[in-house]
Image (cartoon, rainbow, N blue to C red):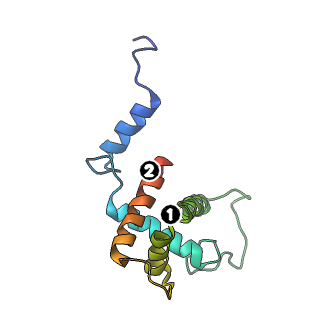
Amino acid sequence: MSIVETPTITKTLRRTKEELGASTGAGRMSDLRLEWHFVNWRAWMRSGCDIVRGLPRASVGLYSGGGRADFDDMADASERRVAVACDAIIEGLCPSQRAAIYHKYLYAVYPFPRGNQAECLERGREGVRTGLERRGIW
């Protein structure tokens, strides 16, 4: 097989993602996964823009890892990067959609009318879903 006949990395990754069920049949992020991104973003926003799990960041005693990051540290860093990306996408939405998302997930109150709350929220969620997919975040 020549180099020209081999599939591109993008096609291979897309095929692998579909085989693993990371997307729905139409190539869209599932509602459950999108909700996870909003919960992750909410935790990041509520913690002063740092993921908090409810446990102390450091324990009393010795660290025997030799200064290397363990899996939990790598997972936290990944979740922070995704939360930052999600925040950037939300900030890019129109004000009514952004207000609806802030109201739903951060319980923010806006004292002036912004249109149909449910409709604005659904459009905002679709905007975030599209933005995350464009960035390759599933």
Q: Position of residue 97 (x, y in %)?
A: 45, 69
Q: Quadrant of the N terminus?
A: top left
Residue 16: quarter of image = top left
Q: Is residue 53 above or below residue 75?
A: below
Q: Is residue 9 above or below residue 56?
A: above
Q: Residue at x 37, y 78 (%)?
A: 117
The type of residue carrying mark 2 is Glu
Of label 2 and label 1, which has the lower sequence position?
Answer: 1
Q: Which mark is residue 43?
A: none
Label 1 sits on a secondary structure element that is loop
Front position among marks 2 and 1? 1
Q: Residue at x 50, y 88 (%)?
A: 111
21 displayed left or right of 136:
left
Q: Which residue is mark 1?
A: 93
The type of residue carrying mark 1 is Leu
Residue 125: quarter of image = bottom left
**Farthest residue toward the top?**
2
The answer, for residue 138, to whether it is visible in the render is: no
Relative to the observer, which residue lies in front, 104 or 12? 104
Q: Mark 2 packing: few (<14 Cα in 10 Å), some, or many (20+)? A: some
Label 2 sits on a secondary structure element that is helix
66 displayed left or right of 37:
right
**Farthest residue toward the left?**
25
Residue 44: quarter of image = bottom right
Q: Which residue is mark 2?
A: 133
Relative to the observer, which residue lies in front, 64 or 79? 79
Whole-number angstrom distance, CA of label 2 to CA of label 1:
15 Å
Q: Is residue 6 above or below residue 118?
A: above
Q: Position of residue 96 (x, y in %)?
A: 46, 72
Count of numbered badges drawn on the protein: 2
Q: Mark 1 packing: few (<14 Cα in 10 Å), some, or many (20+)? A: some
Q: Position of residue 41 (x, y in %)?
A: 52, 69
